[in-house]
Image: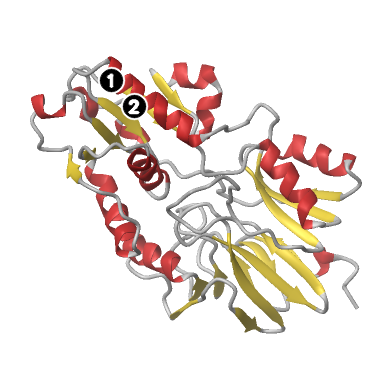
Amino acid sequence: MIPERFDTWLTVDRKGLFCRPGGFHIDPYGGAQRAVVTHGHSDHARPGHARVLATRETLAVMTARLGTPAEVSSQAAAYGERITIGEVAVTLIPAGHVLGSAQVLIEWKGARVVVSGDYKRSADPTCPGFELVPCHLFITEATFALPVFQHGDAGEETAKLLKSRMQFPDRAHVVGVYGLGKCQRLIVLLRDAGYDRPIYLHGALAACCALYESFGVRLGDLKPATGAKREELKGEIVLAPPSAIADRWSRRLPDPVTAFASGWMRVRARARQQGVELPLVISDHADWRELTETIAETGAEEVWVTHGREDALLHHIQMTGRKGRALALVGREDEDQ
């Protein structure tokens, strides 16, 4: 018989979301005895856990960033592999967010719970696409959970970058990108659009690009931007962490056009405040339409919202006849390196 109340066995403590019959946390904050990690971004994959279960790719990201995924042991799970932890069955399902990202399907006493982690529904050739899983309880992110956020087509945004490069052939185009996921996705979008010139990288982005390539994601000719001559960078595309596009590092570039690839660029005022000349609306999170459609398609009668702009989404959930609840989890935001 399916338990009537999910909050009797799925609770929030100081480390985050805890599954009592399984004895594990999902993306816990701080050191947990047992953690299931959805993906490698630093607001989800933290150091100090004793045991970690994640995809092979996420464990590789954690090793690269943290030195080790876990202090005692780590376990790699393939997508679709059903693993028993305590009294529950756990299955990792593609989330479409970044390399190795996963939703967590928990099955216990007939109940099916899906913890989405971060996800998107739009196409991304750098990682397996999101797979919908029917469930009784859906625990969703809400990073862009306002109707204003409609991300559109990433290919069209990439075309804007290439058009600007043609219009300003003597200027470097420096694009702010998150190091894990957005950087590699934009590179592949450029390659798919026929751009075969070298793409220059800030040094902080090189390791994640190498990691993606080690898992078979082809990125083409990449060169370090640091050390390149100023003349060499005229008319070229340079990728850098968002924090670098407005600091001294970018001033050495030839008359740079400052761009930023992010879902936040839908808000033009935010782009202006950050001094972004060319906003590119490319997001690795679900937008409002994707969030609401996914909730409906799961068939879940109850939906919990883990982080982000939850008020509008909770209103929508309740207006569609479902139970809704906001979870107060610490430190859940898109990482900005």
**In the depicted structure, whether residue 167 falls above or below residue 15:** above
Percent of width and height locating residue 122: 57, 45
Percent of width and height locating residue 330: 59, 50
Q: Which element is circle 1 on?
A: helix
Residue 221 visible in the picture: yes
Amino acid type assigned to the residue bearing label 1 in the image: Met
Q: Residue furthest front?
A: 194
Q: How many marks?
A: 2
Residue 23 visible in the picture: no
The C terminus is located in which quarter? top left
Residue drawn at (46%, 56%) of the image = 127
Amino acid type assigned to the residue bearing label 2 in the image: Leu
Residue drawn at (29%, 36%) of the image = 195
The 10 Å Cα crowd at callout 2, few under 14, some 14 to 19, many 20 or more, is: some
Whether pointer 1 and pointer 2 mark residues with C-beta atoms closer than 8 Å, the reply is: yes
Residue drawn at (58%, 78%) of the image = 81
The N terminus is located in which quarter? bottom right
Give the residue pinned by disc 1: 166
**In the depicted structure, whether residue 79 falls above or below residue 256:** below
Left or right side of 218 for 260? right
Residue drawn at (83%, 55%) of the image = 302
Which quadrant of the view contains residue 109? bottom right
Q: Which element is circle 2 on?
A: helix
Percent of width and height locating residue 203: 22, 45
The label shown at residue 162 is 2
Give the spatial CA distance, label 1 vs label 2: 6 Å
| Rendered image coloring scheme | secondary structure
